[in-house]
Amino acid sequence: MGFVLLEDDIPILFGTQGLRVTVSPLHAEAEGLLWAMQEVLRHGIRAVRFESDCEQLIKLIRDDEDWPSMASELDEIKALSAEFIEFSIAYIPRSANIRADSLTKGGRSR
């Protein structure tokens, strides 16, 4: 997993870590988002726009869809999002997610 926090297009926080085996790629994306949210909150940042190249996850979060196999992850994302003063999440294509994608690939190679 990998994330990059930008302020005025300058990286101010980033992270990468391996992930244990997950049920599906969608679960891995949710775990990555949860970890990034926790790290941002841990650093005292309370106004954030998260972006992900996982369109399915963004739809699940935004549309409040009922997806039983993802219920615990979605509940945790919603609970954490309430801790932010400003929280938004948006889909971006993988081609626009180069920094985080390269961190993820680097973490996988380790």
Image: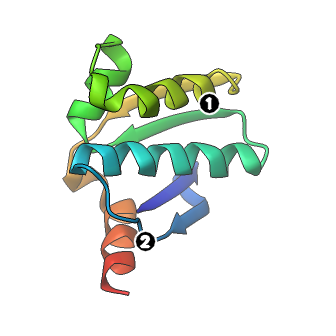
For the point 72% across and 33% down, the residue is 46
* Residue 46: assigned label: none
- The furthest residue to the right: 44
Q: Mark 2 or mark 1, which is nearer the start of the sequence?
A: 2
Q: At which x and y percent is residue 41?
A: 71, 42
For the point 43% across and 51% down, the residue is 32
For the point 35% across and 12% down, the residue is 64
Q: At which x and y percent is residue 63?
A: 31, 12
As helix, strand or loop, the secondary structure at mark 2 comes to loop
Report crowding for label 1: few under 14, some 14 to 19, many 20 or more residues within 10 A (C-alpha): some
Depth check, front residue: 92 or 57: 57
As helix, strand or loop, the secondary structure at mark 1 comes to helix
Depth check, front residue: 104 or 97: 104
Depth check, front residue: 14 or 11: 14
For the point 33% across and 31% down, the residue is 70
Q: Amino acid at mark 1?
A: Leu
Left or right relative to 66: residue 31: right
Left or right relative to 20: residue 80: right
Up/down of 39 relative to 37, above or below: below
Q: Which residue is mark 1?
A: 80
Up/down of 53 relative to 20, above or below: above
Which quarter of the figure has residue 48? top right
Q: Which residue is mark 2?
A: 18
Which quarter of the figure has residue 44? top right
Quick check: marks 1 and 2 in contact, CB under 8 Å? no
Q: At which x and y percent is residue 24?
A: 22, 49
Up/down of 99 relative to 36, above or below: below
Q: Amino acid at mark 2?
A: Gly
User: CA separation, marks 1 and 2?
Assistant: 22 Å
Left or right relative to 60: residue 73: right
Left or right relative to 84: residue 27: left
